[in-house]
Image: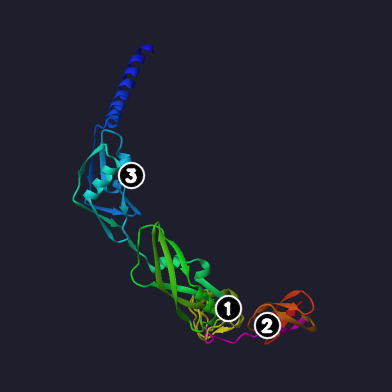
Amino acid sequence: MMQFIPLILVTLISTRSVASELMNRIASKVTVEVSLKIDAEVDLTKDYVYVGDVSTCQSEVDVCPEVLSVLIDEAPLPGETLQVKKASIEKTLNEEFPRLDFQIESPDEIEVISRSRRLGAREMIQALPSQVYMLEDFNGRRVKIKKIAPRGVIKVRPGPVVWNFHIEEALRSISDIRRNSVRLPVKIDIQQGRFHRKIEATAYLVQECFYPVAVSTIPSRSLIKEEDVELLWVKCGRRSVVDIERVIGRQAANTIEQGSVIKIYDFKDSAAIHRGQSVTVIVNNGSLNIKSKGKAMRPGAVGEVIDVKIKGSNKRVSAVIRSKGVVEVSL
């Protein structure tokens, strides 16, 4: 194994000699050639322009990382361009590295383009914090921002945006809204790195109400059951039913399509007994009929079986509806 040691030593000495020679050339003010090739047009998405953004570097000494990290200028705003002169880059590099001989292949001017994208209203809505998007909930109604329309075309760089919304005046005045929709001014601060911009926009607000909505299509003349409807937030409208108890147990006056808000003309009162109604309970035990009072636990038509809670106790029994307000229990 000892026979390989001289070869390893020779290799190390040779490598160190080359590096030492190059460093000595720099130290002794012997110029080292550095070749730069600069593009005529460059796209950027950053805040600043560095030599490495516009050029490639070659040199016999490992100085390219330092050369490429030299700052040229601030990047232009999104969608705008910056003209950088070759002479300006040469001057900056010569001042930074006076012992390097720069050979620059470049046009007289380099065009730096800041890439951009259009800021959309949907992105603004998605960025809204919940306390802003849903402004208030009062008396079975709430008000939310339906859309935001910025004034003019807003350009930003590709990538995420930091948002700050200012609509405190809207929050203070929202309780005075009486119409279904209203427009309010909004001020928005957006930031991407050093890029900062203030935007003025219009927020379109809409009132929503907690209304009964058909879960599935309800055929005409059928009895509307509890599982047929659910309460959802929908746009407020005239002649809509607010209390779901007014709907359950009624007969559909026409076909109610799935997803439709229940209107007061969509049903009619045909149920013999409504939920929570006080009823007369007839207990039939052969030749003996006993009358009592109870409370209907669900609505129903004549002939249907419903649960009834006997007055004065927590006992529930199944009873058949015989007529309006009258149910029968058979023992």
Q: Quadrant of the N terminus?
A: top left
Q: Quadrant of residue 67?
A: top left
Q: Is residue 110 magenta?
A: no
The three-letter amino acid code for the residue at tag 2 is Ile
Position of residue 16 relative to residue 310, above or below, is above
- The residue mark sitting in front, 1 or 3, is 3
- Image x and y of residue 302, in percent: 64, 84
Q: Earlier in the sequence, mark 1 or mark 3?
A: 3
| Residue position for label 3 | 69
Q: CA distance from mark 1 to mark 2?
A: 34 Å
- Mark carried by residue 159: none
User: Mark 2 — residue?
Assistant: 321
Front label number (1 vs 2): 1
210 or 10, which lies in front? 10
Mark 1 crowd level (few <14, some 14–19, many ≥20, 10 Å Cα)? few
Image label count:
3
Can residue 64 be seen here? The reply is: yes
> What secondary structure is found at the residue carrying circle 2?
strand
- The quadrant where residue 225 appears: bottom right
Amino acid at dot 3: Ser
- Mark 1–mark 3 Cα distance, whole angstroms, equals 61 Å
The residues tagged by marks 2 and 3 sit, at their Cα atoms, a distance apart of: 88 Å
Q: Which mark is residue 140?
A: 1
- Magenta region, residue range: 263-283
User: Answer yes or no: do the residues labelled 1 and 3 have beta carbons within 8 Å?
Assistant: no
